[in-house]
Image (cartoon, rainbow, N blue to C red):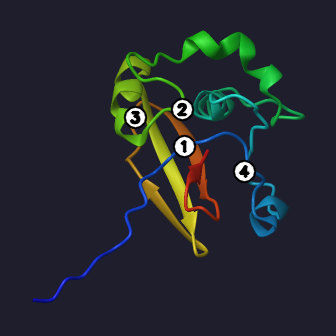
Amino acid sequence: MELKTATYHPLAPRSYIPLPSKLAAKKAVINIKNTDQKCFIWSVLAALHPVGQNAERVSHYLPLEQELRLGNATCPVQPCKLPIVENLSNLRINVFSIENGRCEVGSACRYRHASVHRERDSRRRFHD
């Protein structure tokens, strides 16, 4: 009998982590500097409501927090709850992940559009 095993690393959203220097240097991603577990909310609101300067500050998005309807999804929002948020808020949310220098994307575009980047840290957890 031969037994093969694999390590399972489920997506686990978390709060702010710095972007890899190569990605940060491109200045193409807004990395919200939050201290709470609402990274998903701030990321989606940042995509929907662009600001000119200091877009990484949560203070820009606090007044808009109730705009995003979560239904029974709680923060941090698990990937399996994205369809609930998408339907309630009339959004299609793309989640980008980067691992080993490769970018992967989930979900197709329709409705209003918001893109959320997820970064895997050294413990193999994803972050918005």
Circle 4 residue: 29
Which dot marks residue 54? none
SS at badge 3: helix
For the point 55% across and 55% down, which residue is it?
125
Question: Could you say where residue 110 lies in the image, as x and y percent from the top left?
Answer: 39, 37
- How many angstroms separate mark 2 from mark 1 (CA)? 6 Å
- How many angstroms separate mark 4 from mark 1 (CA)? 17 Å
- Local packing at callout 2 (Cα closer than 10 Å; few below 14, some 14-19, many 20+) is some
Question: Could you say where residue 24 lies in the image, as x and y percent from the top left?
Answer: 80, 59
Question: Who is closer to the viewer here, 12 or 111?
Answer: 12
The nearer-to-camera label among 3 and 4 is 3
Q: From the viewer's perspective, tell me whether residue 110 is left or right of residue 114.
A: left
Question: Who is closer to the viewer here, 52 or 63?
Answer: 63
- How many angstroms separate mark 2 from mark 3 (CA)? 11 Å
Contact (Cβ within 8 Å) of mark 2 with mark 3: no
- Local packing at callout 1 (Cα closer than 10 Å; few below 14, some 14-19, many 20+) is many
Residue type (three-letter) at the residue carrying disc 3? Leu
Pointer 2 or 1: first along the chain: 1
- Local packing at callout 3 (Cα closer than 10 Å; few below 14, some 14-19, many 20+) is some
SS at badge 4: loop
Circle 2 residue: 76
Circle 3 residue: 82
Pointer 3 or 1: first along the chain: 1
Question: Who is closer to the viewer here, 51 or 5?
Answer: 5
Which dot marks residue 13? 1
Above or below, 126 relative to 20: above
SS at badge 2: loop
SS at badge 1: loop
For the point 73% across and 31% down, which residue is it?
50
Question: Could you say where residue 29 lies in the image, as x and y percent from the top left?
Answer: 72, 50
For the point 42% across and 23% down, which residue is it?
73
Residue type (three-letter) at the residue carrying disc 4? Val
